[in-house]
Image (tube, grey):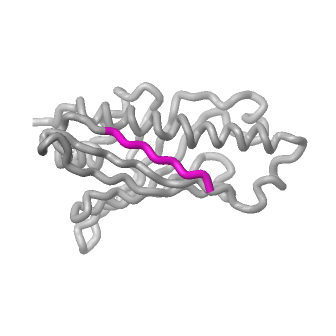
Amino acid sequence: MKTFRSLVVLKRPHAALWTIMRDHLADIAPHIADIEEIRQLDRSVDGDGAVHIVNQWRVRHQVPPVIRSVLKTGELGWIDRNTWDAGTCTCSWTIEPNFLTEYIACSGHTIFASAMAGQGARVLFEGGLDLKPGLLGVLSGGIEKLVSGFLESIVTTVIPRNLRGVVEAAAAFELPK
């Protein structure tokens, strides 16, 4: 399992940032460099008040042609399923990529905490990417190393960069009056 962790501290109270990230993610998507679109597919609230959201993400990165032919996709995207627990200020999530879904598991959580004497927010984003058994059997012809490197770059650069972009865009977002 490849793990990742990213910490962002911003000058926006964590309660406001929490609300924007949970309730206005699709609205801030146009302000995020790497994101083409975020579309909310489903939203529900359970008996304990936890909010469950399903989002579809499309990013602007193109898949290299060699990998595209193996993965049978031209664009990067994923479905995220998340649960927002206001009691712990934690969003737990899973990501289902739009390629090799049966072989890739990605999950983690995002924790929002107060910073800067209540004037800011500390956002900790951590999780892991697990490549399930059988993936190498799907990737024949010596392309395993290339695809593994591509997936590792997503974990080590694209995901943390997207998190920073999302959180920074959320911190700059003006809530509707």
Question: Which residue shows up at 57% across the image and 43% down it?
Answer: 155
Question: Which residue shows up at 87% across the image and 41% down it?
Answer: 142
Q: Looking at the picture, does residue 109 appear above or below residue 177?
A: below
Of residues 14 and 19, the one nearer the viewer is 14
Q: Position of residue 21 (x, y in %)?
A: 29, 44
Question: Which residue shows up at 39% across the image and 29% down it?
Answer: 32
Q: Position of residue 61 (x, y in %)?
A: 57, 28
Of residues 6 and 174, the one nearer the viewer is 6
Q: Residue furthest front?
A: 117
Query: The N terminus lies in which quarter of the figure?
Result: bottom right
Q: Is residue 2 magenta?
A: yes
Q: Left or right: 23 with respect to 104?
A: left
Q: Residue furthest left?
A: 177
Q: Is residue 107 magenta?
A: no
Of residues 85 and 160, the one nearer the viewer is 160
Q: Left or right: 58 with respect to 30?
A: right
Of residues 81 and 172, the one nearer the viewer is 172
Q: Residue furthest right?
A: 141
Question: Which residue shows up at 35% across the image and 61% down it?
Answer: 83
Residue 176, picture quadrant: top left
Q: Position of residue 95 (x, y in %)?
A: 51, 52
Range covered by the magenta-colored residues: 1-8
Q: Position of residue 51 (x, y in %)?
A: 29, 61
The secondary structure that most of the magenta stretch takes on is strand
**Count of numbered badges drawn on the protein:** 0
Q: Looking at the picture, does residue 31 appear above or below residue 96?
A: above
Query: The C terminus lies in which quarter of the figure?
Result: top left
